[in-house]
Amino acid sequence: MRQRPALALLLLACGLPVQADPRFEVVDLSAHLPANGGSQLIDLRDNGTASGMLLSGSRWKPVVWRGHVDGGVEVFDGGFYDEHFLRAGNGNGLIVGQLPGSSVGWARVGNALQCIPTPNGCGAAALYLASLGNDVNEAGEIVGQRALALPGGGFRFEAYRAVIDSQGGFDFQGLGLYEGSFNTSAQAIDNLGRIAGFATLNAVGAEQQALLWTSDGVRLLGPPGRNRRPTAISDSGHVVGVERGPGNGPGGFFALRWHIDDPMQPGTVLPALPGAVSSFANDVNDAGSVVGHAQLDDSPLGGRGWLHEDGALYDLNDLLPPGSPWLVLAANAINNPGDIAATARFGALPGTRAVLLRRQPHDAIFASSFALP
């Protein structure tokens, strides 16, 4: 995306160092899957464990790649009618997500995918309740949103933290309703146990208040806004999220970033790729590098994965080797080494592929100044 040759030449002439743009190679993790109609890479941890989904027939099945496949690949396929949408996975292969057509969550328990129970259990009576599994940290703490039965009847929806106990059940800790009455949801948890989420103040207007839960209680992340919610939190205190509004076109989303040391800041709006009608921040690492995807149009090829790093915004397709046949549609996660979990298309072949964008070392100061476009 950035064109810097002239600036680079000027800096070299002045004897000043040039910061090379990052470069990536594409590792096709879908090549290690059974024949399929598509795949996505959703999460990536520092030890190389990755998690995503395989499209088998017309249904999505969770997948875990151990250590960039060196430790094997696990496909969770319960048959033709089985489908599970994956939300997140940790370095130990614990994955969580949502059952299709409902707000019921699931988590991996042993080698099985087990429903996270609602107050009405996991049967048909739970279909319209919630037990969403949104994220999991390295300690195995799961966060999400769970239906809360009210004493007088009816339900609210409350953010929760849970762990899997020795019997394979779920030990829940409710995080409370906001101001005692507004629904809450936990979206992300770091390895220090801090949780980012939101409260819904007005469901009709989609007015939401971003929240941060720590050992000291709950704090606000800036003012409320339309569909304003965090999506990820790093151990260094970076939080990213999205808000809907006029910022990137009519009704479009734009990406936000906060830091927990300044929780009352309104949230910094991250720049969007040219032509984007919406921009979504999906993850952030400890260095503050943010990845996400921009939507240019509604076509199957209308998405673009992006990286915001060291104050610069990149279309990830510009950081691949020249002539690459890959089109990166979305960047879903980034680990601390700087590798990226992405979804891409290969040439004119149909379907998406789960790919790892492996960061390359800077071999020379000239890497971004001369040879590469």
Image (spheres, rainbow, N blue to C red):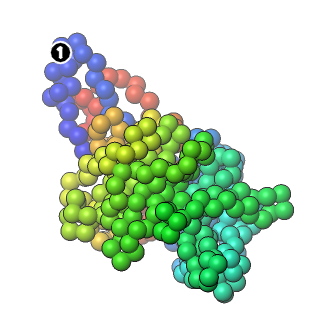
Residue at (48, 68) in percent of width and height: 182
Residue 121, relative to residue 223: is it above or below?
below
Which quarter of the picture shows residue 284?
top left
Query: Residue 266 appears at what percent x and percent y?
Result: 32, 49
Left or right: where 88 falls relative to 288: right
Query: Between residues 9 and 174, which one lies in front from this camera angle?
Result: 174
Left or right: where 351 falls relative to 311: right
Query: Between residues 177 and 10, which one lies in front from this camera angle?
Result: 177
Query: Residue 215 appears at what percent x and percent y?
Result: 60, 44
User: Is residue 38 visible in the rendered structure shown here?
Assistant: no
Residue at (25, 69) in percent of width and height: 251
User: Is residue 142 visible in the rendered structure shown here?
Assistant: yes
User: Could you tell me which quadrant the C terminus lies in?
Assistant: top left
Residue lying furthest right:
167
Does dot 1 land on a helix, a strand or a loop? helix
Residue lying furthest bottom:
124
Q: Which residue is mark 1?
A: 13
Residue at (21, 25) in percent of width and height: 8
Q: How many marks overall?
A: 1
Query: Residue 20 appears at what percent x and percent y?
Result: 32, 29
Amino acid, disc 1: Ala
